[in-house]
Image (cartoon, grey):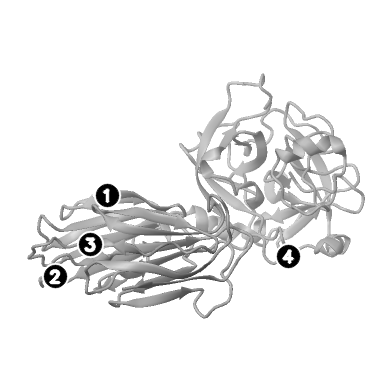
Amino acid sequence: MKIAFVTIVALVAMASAMPAKKQDSYFPTNRFIVGGVPATPYEFPHIVDMRLSPYGHWCAGSIISPEWVVTAAHCSDSAMTSYTLTAGEHNITSGGVEGTEQVRQVVKIIIHPGYGSPHRYENDIALMKVAPPFDLSTIVQPVVVPDVNFAPTSIATVAGWGVLTQGGAYPDVLMKVDVPFVDDATCNANYVEYGGTAESMICYGEAGKDSCQADSGGPIMCGPDNALCGIVSWGYGCAVAGFPGVYTETSYFADWIKEMTTPTAEDPAPVTTVTNCGGMIESSSAAINFNLGSNVAPNQKCAWVVKAPYDQLRMQLVESGLTSGDGIYVTEYNLVGPGRQVQITTVGEDVMLTGAMYFLTFVAGPSGPSQGFSLEFYSSGFPGGSDALSGFAHLTTPTGSHSYPVGGGSYQNNENAVFIVNPEAGGDRTLTFTRVDLESASDCGYDALAVYTWTNNQYTQSLRFCGTTMPNPFPIPGGLSLVTFTTDSSITATGFDFSWA
């Protein structure tokens, strides 16, 4: 899937089903092994066939541990549930079931946070976690990831399941080709018209020998131990003289790979203590001590956004002065809004959560006498549980207004913002949008505002909208609501204003 300048009409239909690293006309979408020979079955026991539903073979990757595969970021931006990874593979055609395959579902994707900046394919690396882990054997083994001091070899081997010639037929079996190293200065000079190359890239190839699309994410290997010196990324054409293949230099990311794939244990004690009613808690662990031993006003509501750095979260109610009419609720949050919810009721019982961003909501009963609680959470596991919120506000005044972006201007691409409207005085409120300027779509599938009210002890979507038409004012029963704002990767506008009273 390494990008190429291809104008052959016969490739158009195939390209529409293949992942593209470049959308520009001068970086078409077909990269394949060119000038190679069949690999010996299971010669590279770390390589995996990446399939994306409904297309079939999509990219490749390399096993770095029983749970983790490293691949290209540009292969990894579809829905996680659409991917499967197969180890122990050689023949990938429909009739090529060899009995050695291990098919695994992808359960986590970590794309390098610097992917695409400043060079469009800089930091083109991602990690995929599989479940269950691969069973290691003589034909399924992790690859050696070279350290930061690794020196490229004069010849390297790249392998993949792409077509044999530009515009030609796909092979049944894994192919490989030996390619020569091209020094950084020469490679950068050859590609200067297309933005040049970056320090984190390495180049191999010559006329007639190269990788291409459908090889993307797969390995280029150096030395007698076939160390993973690069990941198939991008380039001009397929095996075109003067334009070698450009690879993500794996040794440049050795420390990042280790950090992302090494699980972190819980803190021995909470590192943060919170006493106020609601807000943002961004920490690896925290103690939330709210009015323990003191009276809580009837019907009081508090909402915290809990954002942890790792993908496992353990919560425990440590002490409680709550009554049967009170409730503590933990609600999953992602780009589609509040999701699954659990209630915490028993002191000392662990509540285990998968993910890293949640709403923690406390609701006092109508009659009391509630006397607060102490709750702790601990994050552990693998880094990269969720992205930072692009905007946040905890709005607690009896009446007020809020504008986004704060200070004017236009909002950004890929926004994920949350605003908690929760007046401390409690009581019913009315939420009114006074200005709306968002990208428009019939289903609001690009940029959108959504409002959730706390109803029947859960967050219920009251409306979702976009464009420039303002909705009618609507009630906030009990005074607690969430305003969420999400955007896609293109077209921005000037945002919105709302008030509550």
- Going from N to C along the chain, the mark reached first, 3 or 4, is 4
Q: Name the residue under label 3.
A: 362
Check if mark 2's residue and mark 1's residue have beta carbons within 8 Å: no
Query: For the N terminus, which image quadrant?
Result: top right
Q: Is residue 54 above or below residue 481?
A: above
Q: Name the residue under label 4.
A: 199
User: How far from the left and from the top, in percent, is residue 24?
Assistant: 78, 54
Helix, strand or loop at mark 4: loop
Marks 1 and 3, how far apart at CA: 12 Å
- Going from N to C along the chain, the mark reached first, 4 or 2, is 4
Locate residue 72 relative to residue 197 in the image: left or right: left
Query: For the C terminus, which image quadrant?
Result: bottom left
Q: Which mark is residue 276?
A: none
Q: Name which residue type carries label 3.
A: Phe
Q: Name which residue type carries label 4.
A: Glu
Q: Name the residue under label 1.
A: 342
Marks 4 and 1, how far apart at CA: 47 Å
Q: In which quarter of the image is residue 452?
A: bottom left
Q: Residue at x 77, y 28 (%)?
A: 171
Marks 4 and 2, how far apart at CA: 59 Å
Q: Name the residue under label 2.
A: 297
Viewer-side label of 3, 4: 3
